Image (cartoon, rainbow, N blue to C red):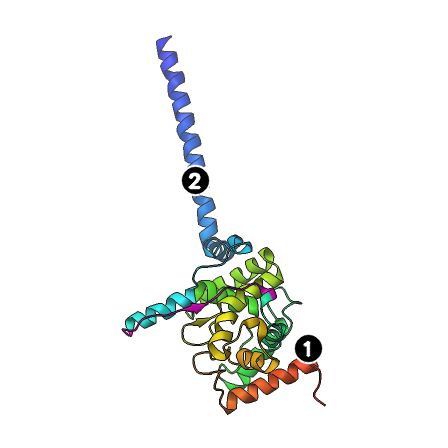
């Protein structure tokens, strides 16, 4: 009888060990599938953007990168940034940024397929990186989480994060975040700081020409100075104003 009980207990212990092994094996397979699958890997390691619904980021990857550059150069890093809601940013600046950076911002879901195709054609034709195709949402993902690092892994993570931003946030919230974090000069971040730094005005009071100068400086914010524009920046600003007029954002000049 005792022999039978010992046998029964041994069988139950073996069953428990077997179930434990099966469980651990299943966990291992799940983890392996996540890491081995490119989509699973990228989803696992891409940032969680849920908090951006109601919270403003205290810092960004690009700002941290600039701070590190300053430290390496032995100079202090000074940051000018004042958060303002979208409604307190001049519609002229909002429109100028959209026509320059992402004309179909309110129509796409994070990626402008037409611009991407045109970019590939132009870059292939000129055998150099002559034209970009990043949308405002892609630029926001890069600015917030990835900085200026260039790698296939970073571009893939940026793409996944772009999708997450579009699914989680409204278009107006994406634009509000973008206009508050983008670089507008050495140590100058966001529309309010840029307007005050360049023109001594609040972002809500910018004129169309001032807005066009600021928007036109976005591609090279540390080389172009909206407060003292050179011929190239002035020309870009005129093109921006003409684009705004063509889309009915400004009246045509008599």
Identity of the residue furthest to the left in this view: 74
Residue at 52 percent across and 75 percent down: it is 201
Residue 103 vs residue 217, the one in the foreground: 217
**Mark 2 residue element:** helix
Residue 90: image x %, image y %? 60, 72
Residue at 38 percent across and 13 percent down: it is 5
Residue picked out by circle 1: 249
Residue 78: within the magenta? yes
- The magenta span reads 73-87
Looking at the image, residue 44 sits to the left or right of residue 168; the answer is left
Q: Quadrant of the N terminus?
A: top left
Closest to the camera, between mark 1 and mark 2, is: 1
**Mark 1 residue element:** loop
Looking at the image, residue 56 sits to the left or right of residue 76; the answer is right
Q: Which label number is shown at residue 25?
A: 2
Q: Which label number is shown at residue 168?
A: none
The overriding secondary structure of the stretch rendered in magenta is loop
């Amino acid at each position: 009888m005792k022999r039978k009980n010992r046998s029964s207990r041994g069988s139950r212990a073996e069953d428990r060990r077997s179930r434990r092994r099966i469980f651990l094996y299943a966990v291992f397979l799940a983890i392996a599938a996540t890491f081995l699958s490119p989509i699973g890997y990228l989803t696992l390691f891409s940032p969680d953007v849920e908090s951006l619904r109601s919270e403003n980021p205290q810092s960004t990857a690009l700002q941290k990168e600039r701070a590190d550059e300053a430290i390496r150069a032995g100079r202090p890093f000074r940051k000018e940034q004042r958060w303002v809601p979208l409604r307190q940013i001049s519609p002229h600046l909002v429109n100028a940024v959209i026509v320059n950076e992402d004309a179909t911002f309110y129509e796409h879901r994070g990626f402008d397929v037409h611009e991407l195709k045109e970019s590939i054609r132009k870059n292939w034709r000129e055998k150099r990186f002559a034209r970009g195709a990043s949308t405002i949402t892609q630029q926001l993902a890069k600015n917030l989480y990835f900085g200026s690092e260039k790698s296939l892994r970073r571009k893939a993570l940026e793409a996944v994060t772009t999708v997450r931003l579009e699914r989680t946030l409204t278009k107006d919230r994406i634009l509000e975040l973008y206009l508050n974090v983008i670089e507008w000069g050495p140590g100058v971040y966001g529309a309010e700081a840029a307007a005050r730094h360049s023109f001594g005005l609040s972002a809500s009071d910018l004129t169309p020409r001032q807005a066009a100068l600021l928007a036109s400086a976005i591609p090279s914010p540390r080389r172009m100075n909206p407060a003292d524009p050179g011929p190239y920046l002035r020309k870009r600003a005129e093109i921006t104003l003409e684009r705004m007029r063509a889309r009915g954002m400004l009246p045509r000049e008599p």
